[in-house]
Amino acid sequence: MSYNRRKFIQAAGAITAGAMILPQFGCKNNNQTAAAETGTATAAPPSLSNFGIQLYTLRDVMPEDPKGVIKQLADFGYTQIESYEGDKGMFWGMSNTEFKSYLDSLGMSIVSSHCDINTDFEKKAAQAAEIGMKYLVCPWVGPQKSMDNWKKVTDKFNECGAICQKNGIRFAYHNHEYTFVAFSGMIPHNFIMENTDPALVDHEMDIYWVVTGGADPIEFLTKYPNRFRLCHVKDRLKTAAYDEREASCDLGTGSIDYAKILKVAQDNGMQYYIVEQERYDNSTPLESVKVNAEYLKNLRFA
């Protein structure tokens, strides 16, 4: 693997990190098709008109041929890109404007990017704004050892949000499982939501990590409407043990009921639906992202 994600996400926002083993919140899969009654039964139209992909999903092949891989993603039906800050930067060895021009030629857009919020953040915000990106996203802060540290985290997010706002874009935080596990008599993710300014900070719900942390995505979506504006859509192996962290799989083959969850997400302000996958048991990354695109093309909300 040419890019070590653990090394990156720890550098991207770590204050204090630790390890946790977490229970699983399971969702039963529903039939993903529906019928509309118009005298005769006809298939309902797909529920999503646009969806994107986090390029970390292609981390093993992107560095060799970024343009070629992105062209294949466009052919599969992805219209939106979420990048990440790897060895070649958010724009994969191109300038921000060159990257945008290439995506334009494919009918795609870069919506957001995960990035290191502790290095040159103002410069990154300006570059993102110049090409019409909507978000810069913090991908990781790690479990914290004190309430004071959690307060430092939310203060940092508000600061980043102010920088993004000044540049005409938005800031968001991407969760992992640790924020849904009780700490010092509270759930850290509730603390994050309640101590970040909605005018400055949005949130990217990684639905897989919410489930892996033992929480209910629907509960958080309805408790904090219009706060989660982006989401990561990735499935969890039906056979995964409750404490198994790395158990993602092709969409539609796992235990997460996306027909139900994404309907609630849309009703509560979700705007961007972004595929991510981190494990491949019986396929290559490109084979899996093609399967994932077909799943979302045909998804009907429950």
Image (cartoon, rainbow, N blue to C red):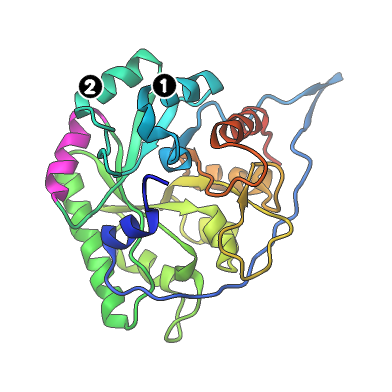
Q: Quadrant of the C terminus?
A: top right
Q: Is residue 184 magenta?
A: no
Task: Look at mark 1 in the image and give the residue it sits on.
Answer: 68
Occupied quadrant, residue 131: top left
Residue type pointed to by label 2: Glu
Residue type pointed to by label 1: Gly
Asked whether residue 222 appears in the rendered view, the answer is: no
Tell me, for residue 98, which label it has, or none. 2
Choose mark 1 or mark 2, whichever is in front: 1
**Residue plotted at (60% across, 31% down):** 287
Does 25 appear above or below 1?
below
Tell me, for residue 157, which label it has, or none. none
Occupied quadrant, residue 65: top left
Front in this rendered view, residue 207 or 195 = 207
**Residue plotted at (27% across, 43% down):** 87
Front in this rendered view, residue 88 or 153 = 88
Q: Is residue 127 magenta?
A: yes
Occupied quadrant, residue 197: bottom left
**Residue plotted at (18% across, 42% down):** 125
The residue carrying pointer 2 sits among few (fewer than 14), some (14 to 19) or many (20 or more) residues within 10 Å by Cα, namely few
Front in this rendered view, residue 273 or 263 = 273
**Residue plotted at (31% across, 18% down):** 102
Q: Percent position (x, y) of residue 239?
A: 74, 59
Q: Percent position (x, y) of residue 208?
A: 56, 55
Q: Percent position (x, y) of residue 62?
A: 40, 33
Does 257 appear above or below 100?
below
Please report the bounds of the magenta region as a residue range. Answer: 120-132
Q: CA distance from mark 1 to mark 2?
A: 15 Å
Q: Is residue 131 left or right of residue 198?
A: left
Residue that extends furthest to the right in the rendered view of this protein: 40
Does 262 appear above or below 187?
above
